[in-house]
Image (cartoon, helix red, strand yellow):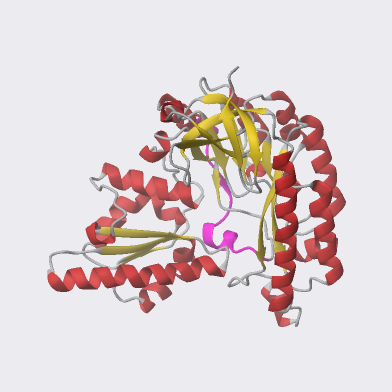
Amino acid sequence: MNAYDSGKVKALLGEDGFVPTEDLDQADLVVVNTCSVREKAEDKLHGFLGRARAVKKRREAADPKDRVLLAVAGCVAQQEGAALQRRYKDLDLVFGPDAVTRVVDLVRRAEHERVLDTEFIDADDYVFADTVDPDAADSPGAFVTIQKGCDNKCTFCIVPTTRGPELSRPSDEVLAEVAALVARGVREVTLIGQNVNSYGLKVAGERTFAQLLYAVAEVPGVERIRFTTSHPRDMGPDVVQAFADLPQLCSHLHLPVQSGSDPVLRRMKRFYTRDGYLDLVDRLRGARPDLALTTDFIVGFPGETDQDFEQTIDLLAAVRFHASFSFKYSPRPGTPALKLLDRGDEVPAEVAQARLERLQLRQKQLSHDANKALVGSTQQVLVEGWSRHDPGVICGRTSTFKTINFPGDPGLVGRTVPVQVTRAFANSLRGELATS
């Protein structure tokens, strides 16, 4: 979602005459878009600001007319607001996610005064940016936002605080953006929202999420559809049925579970049980037998016992996730889980680290096993571009979201081609173009 917001910022500024650069010494405007889900990302912001401020100070000292505007956007901006400007006196602009569509006006104001914009916009007045990111349009795949904010109250999560209440984007706007992207060469769209399964439920007459999936599949030229993120509690039978009905819907689903322990899930306020999650997995795989599932885990959540963690390891093996994102619990400002820490339920750091390492090692084994099972098979691969590591090698993704590298011509970018899998690694595949 932050990548999507960054693309919108770049597109809107581009319409106002800005040209992007990765060279700080060339920049007239530096925008740092931020995440605050975990503390580590917030730490990275302050490190980058140190480098950017040094460039700003040096250039403006050499020539007072050589202004460098420095802006912080996104969730840390929303979370910290004026505190950032108090800490950094040379920070020109701070704006939250709701202000993305106003970035051009905010930058113009920042040329004359320090600007802070972290107000949430009323639902009746909120406008989703419809400017197409030129970089997204040049790629075979693109994100399309379908909602913003979140109404869930997971005790570990700061997103409702930083992105505000849930609001669904009108489906006609979603379909129009999809059509515009396809017209520019995009073949795969990923519908994004904090909880896509609840899309449209608060708007009378609006499509449900499942109905939106069917509508997107009807847009001419859409070859592949993905979506993220799903809350297991809200995954209805109509979305499960879509996996059986829609060939455009990819055989991959990111379904965050967070923990395999019912007591931990209750403390997290996830509102589903371990057995309920496993039943949902069975129904999804019944609808799409080759479905590759990925997930999120938080280890070391306050009060997590050894038995709780063993339940998570057991769930990992039971589902056989193809990949997972796993992290140690990170206390975030204002979240209800902080009360558990006040009660003395903190998991010692060394215990949490040991659990994380064990989970990640087991996941690596499962990921490698899942990939090895594909060796010798032929996969349909949407080619994305050059491999990041191997010269003369291109890469793409299978329907199951596996990255595969293979020798080929960059003229294949944007095309779906058959590739035979020849080798498997934990995080990727190697292959050769199939001859037939």
Measuring 29% from the left and 53% from the top, which residue is drawn there? Answer: 105
Image: 386 above or below 3: above
Measuring from the top left, give residue 94's x and y in whole percent.
Answer: 37, 64
12 on left or right of 400: left
* Between 165 and 246, the one nearer to me in the picture: 246
Residue 385, by quadrant, is: top left
Residue at 44% over, 44% down: 127
Q: Residue at x 32, y 67 (%)?
A: 52
Q: How many marks?
A: 0
Res 274 → quadrant:
bottom right
**Horizontal side, residue 402 vs residue 286: left or right:** left
Against 257, is 264 above or below? below
Q: Is residue 91 visible?
A: no
Residue 153 location (% of width, % of height) = 68, 60
Residue 165 among magenta residues: yes
Residue range (magenta): 156-173
Q: Nearer the viewer, residue 308 or 236?
A: 308
Q: Quadrant of the C terminus?
A: top right
Asked whether 222 or 93 is in front, the reply is 222
Residue 330 appears anywhere in the view: yes
Q: Residue at x 59, y 38 (%)?
A: 430
Q: Is residue 270 magenta?
A: no
Locate residue 236: give its quadrant: top right
Which residue is situated farthest in the top direction here? 436
Where residue 262 appears, as percent x and y from the top left, is 84, 60
Task: Choose between 25 and 347: the one closer to the eye.
Answer: 25
Q: Position of residue 351 (x, y in %)?
A: 74, 75
